[in-house]
Image (cartoon, grey):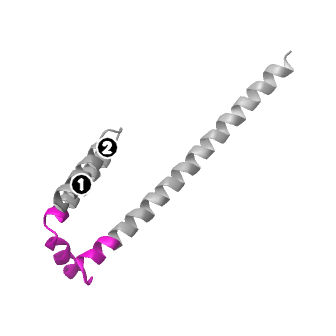
């Protein structure tokens, strides 16, 4: 039962992400992460095997470490995107202020 629910959730998340405009490497990353997620849901012993290879106690701990790293990556990505958009907005507002100043001084 839980395998079906988790598999469906991963597939729906993949479809949601895939419905947005992504470039080639982003699509490959989504497909790769989705495939890995499905493999870990269907074959949970693989996580334990990978954890032993990497020197981590349990597969659950390994997945937690990966989730924390992914969360940090997503947070940093959102922060830098926000800063980039803020800089663009500042540039647009400055140009608009200059245009408004020029048109009001010509009257």
Q: Nearer the viewer, mark 1 or mark 2?
A: 2
Looking at the rendering, which quadrant does residue 34 occupy? bottom left
**Foreground residue, 49 or 107?**
49
Left/right of residue 92 with respect to residue 4 in the rendered view:
right
- The first of marks 1 and 2 along the sequence is 2
For residue 34, which numbered disc appears in the image? 1
- Residue 102 position in % (x across, y down): 80, 23
The residue at which mark 2 appears reads as: 16
**Foreground residue, 2 or 82?**
2
Using the numbered discs, state the Cα–Cα distance from disc 1 to disc 2 in whole angstroms: 12 Å
Q: Residue at x 56, y 47 (%)?
A: 84
Left/right of residue 100 with respect to residue 84 in the rendered view:
right
Q: Is residue 54 above or below residue 78?
A: below
Residue range of the region highlighted in magenta in the rendering: 39-64
- Classified by dominant secondary structure, the portion drawn in magenta counts as helix
**Foreground residue, 60 or 53?**
60
- Residue 58 position in % (x across, y down): 24, 81
Other residues around mark 2 within 10 Å, as few (<14) / some (14–19) / many (≥20): few
């Amino acid at each position: 039962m839980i395998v079906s629910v988790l598999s469906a959730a991963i597939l729906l998340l993949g479809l949601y992400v895939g419905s947005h405009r992504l470039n080639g490497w982003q699509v490959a990353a989504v497909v790769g992460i989705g495939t890995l997620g499905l493999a870990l849901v269907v074959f949970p012993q693989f996580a334990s095997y990978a954890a032993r290879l990497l020197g981590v106690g349990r597969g659950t701990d390994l997945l937690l470490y990966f989730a924390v790293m992914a969360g940090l990556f997503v947070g940093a990505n959102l922060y830098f995107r926000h800063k980039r958009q803020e800089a663009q907005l500042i540039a647009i507002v400055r140009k608009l202020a200059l245009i408004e100043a020029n048109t009001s001084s010509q009257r």
